[in-house]
Image (tube, rainbow, N blue to C red):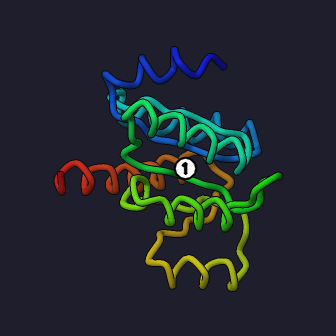
Amino acid sequence: MVYSTVIENTKLKPIIFYADDDADDRQLLRRALTAINKEYTVIEAQDGAEAISLLQKLKSAGVFPSLIVMDINMPKIDGKQAFTQIRLDESLSKIPIVIYSTSKSELDQLFFKRKNTEYMTKPNDYSHIEKLAVRMLSYCSKVASSN
């Protein structure tokens, strides 16, 4: 991926940033999000390390996502570690994050509940993915209205 081209193109449209190591999950959610609202550009990372790196590149270019959607179980840097790094970065810390994972672990859910972060379990059917995508997009509206 040529990051400079992606960054330049996103200056015109709001961004949803999605980090997930499962390509099929990324494709399904991207399809649902863009079907609901074509105004957003979805930028994807395939693991937590790539997510942190790309978010830093976007930040350096003055481009900030309206929403970050993140899986928990990813290689290199997992979702909890990436979440913590994002929250420690003053420039990124106010961006809403939604956790979107197959994990049904009560410990995972409790971790994010304590951080006041929405936790959504990935469904098996596309119609439910679309419903969750609508809920995710509602977080973008809150960001836009608070600026």
**Residue that extends furthest to the right in the rendered view of this protein:** 75
* Picture residue at 33% right of the left edge, 26% below the top: 13
Describe the element under mark 1 as helix, strand or loop.
helix
* Picture residue at 68% right of the left edge, 65% below the top: 81
* Image quarter in which the N terminus is found: top right
Amino acid type of the residue that numbered disc 1 sits on in the rendered structure: Ile
Q: Position of residue 27 (x, y in %)?
A: 64, 34
Q: Position of residue 102 (x, y in %)?
A: 72, 62
Tell me if 83 is positioned left or right of 133 in this view. right
Up-down relation of residue 116 to residue 19 (above or below): below
Q: Which residue is mark 1?
A: 129
Q: Count neighbours of disc 1 (C-alpha within 10 A) and say few if under 14, some if 14 to 19, many if 20 or more.
A: many
* Picture residue at 70% right of the left edge, 51% below the top: 48
Q: Nearer the viewer, residue 59 or 137?
A: 59
**Count of all numbered marks drawn on residues in the image:** 1
Up-down relation of residue 146 to residue 1 (above or below): below
Up-down relation of residue 146 to residue 65 (above or below): below
Q: Position of residue 32 (x, y in %)?
A: 50, 38
Location of residue 62 by image quarter: top left
Q: Nearer the viewer, residue 127 or 72?
A: 72
Q: Nearer the viewer, residue 95 or 100?
A: 95
* Picture residue at 36% right of the left edge, 45% below the top: 66
Q: Position of residue 10 (x, y in %)?
A: 40, 24
Up-down relation of residue 142 to residue 66 (above or below): below
Tell me if 76 is positioned left or right of 14 in this view. right
